[in-house]
Image (cartoon, rainbow, N blue to C red):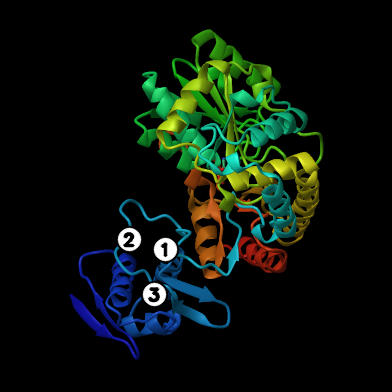
Amino acid sequence: MVSRATSDLHLDLAPGRGVRSGLMEALRDAVRSGRLTPGSRLPSSRSLAADLGLARNTVADAYAELVAEGWLTARQGSGTRVAPRAVPCDRPPGPVRPLPPDLARPAHDLRPGRPDVAAFPRAAWLRATGRTLAAAPDEAFGYGDDRGRPELRAALAEHLARARGVRTTPDRIVVCAGAVHGLALLAGLLRARRVRRVAAEAHGLHLHRELLERHGLAVGALPVDDAGARTDLLDGEGAVLLTPAHQFPTGVALRPDRRAAAVDWARATAGLVVEDDYDGEFRYDRRPVGALQGLDPERVVYLGTASKALAPGLRLGWLVLPAGLAAEVERAVAGEGGTRVSAVDQLVLADLLTSGVYDRHVRERRQAYRRRRDELVATLAERAPGVAVRGLAAGLHALVELPTGDGPPGAAEAAAQRAAAWHGLAVEGLDRFRHPDAPPRPDALVVGYATPSPSAWAGALEALCRVLARPAG
Ligand SMILES: Cc1ncc(COP(=O)(O)O)c(C=O)c1O
């Protein structure tokens, strides 16, 4: 162990490892042991590099990675500091992921998958709660139906038919605690049916893939191209998880022949298509692409959520099931003690749906997000003309493809993420969503433009421009 004291920082650099990782570990140790306290300012990378006899870039890279891990924060004007909630114990096992959401407190947040939660319709929710509590029968406060409140299931059946082309009846709808809960119910059911292998989009939401694996299912990678998932390649899998309206994260819509291929495959093999319609209500330039479920309600399970249109904190989602599955899922929910969603929240959502308030809110949000999307495109065209912005027709995120120059695959994405960390910007790289068996796609960032509140949006966009205009070395 080599102990080196800098002007205001004492670091123990472990021998025999890369200089940068040795420096990172020494800094983590200093934070863990309390020698560096939350909020304390670190020397500039230039002066620490001079003190330690290291290249400045080495120190700068180590700082940037520690910012990405949540140990440090970097703000323009106030330098690099120990994060306010400094990481108290060792990192979780497994490879380091950039910006774990509960550790980092980024100045700017463009992570995908989140709506602007500042736009939650508080007043409308409050009014609907008053109406609901006044009108609800006493029985609503009992254990109730395991599938969820009948008022909500009836309202959803009508709304989904009208807005998404879903064909169903209320008795085939099960209310669940967000899409992730619905998917967990389905995974349990597939295992009970002795399904071992399922397919998921080669680039997709890692949380969902990991959830299926935790339930003992082997998840194969279904390639995705400009026409969406290659459903023509489906084979002996028992089920496939798809995002047909707006592929997550590439943003393409599943082409009609691929939609047909998914249904044909399911019919031919008695397989199940799980349609994750997470942001299908947000389509900007044309009418929304209708749900795949409409093509064959007996082969496609539709998975919906209030997380994008209202707020993820509600934990409100719904499964629309084929007749043959509805009773099985109901039994699974009963085994968990009934639906996990509060009856009051269910009744309030039913009220918002039937009163037209929900539709008005979605229309208003669609306009606001479309404006942001247009600003993103126009601003990047001016400030970062080397990037290509894709996946814009719908949803709350865009794929920003990066120029790679002569660099190796992945280098531009990693450099952009390092630069983002420097600018206090939380944004995901496309590779984070890659199935481990899938080949990498061109370097890109997945930019969630709905995430910031209105007051934070301009700053976040500016930070993104700086990152893209000046990739970190
Ligand atoms: C692809 C995808 N599906 C579904 C969801 C919504 O999940 P939940 O309803 O559990 O919040 C998200 C949220 O980020 C998502 O990205």
Which comes before the other along the chain, label 1 or label 2? 1
Q: Position of residue 231 (x, y in %)?
A: 57, 21
Q: Position of residue 53 (x, y in %)?
A: 33, 80
Q: Decide: marks 1, 2 in contact (CB < 8 A)?
A: yes
Query: Which of these two is toward me, 114 or 247?
Result: 114
Residue located 48% across and 59% down the image: 101
* Label 3: which secondary element: loop
When the figure is inspected, residue 371 is found, relative to residue 76, above or below; the finding is above
Residue located 77% across and 57% down the image: 375
Seen from this angle, which residue lies furthest bottom?
A: 7
* Residue, disc 3: 55
Kind of residue indicated by mark 1? Glu
* Residue, disc 1: 69
Residue located 38% across and 56% down the image: 96
Q: Decide: marks 3, 2 in contact (CB < 8 A)?
A: no
Query: Which of these two is toward me, 420 or 344?
Result: 344
Q: Quadrant of residue 371?
A: bottom right
In this image, 337 relative to 30: left or right? right
Q: Position of residue 365 (x, y in %)?
A: 76, 51
Q: Work out whether residue 252 can be spotted.
A: no
Is ligand 1 within 8 Å of the beta carbon of the residue shown at mark 2? no
Residue located 66% across and 47% down the image: 398
Q: Decide: marks 1, 3 in contact (CB < 8 A)?
A: no
Query: Which of these two is toward me, 180 or 289?
Result: 180
* Label 1: which secondary element: helix
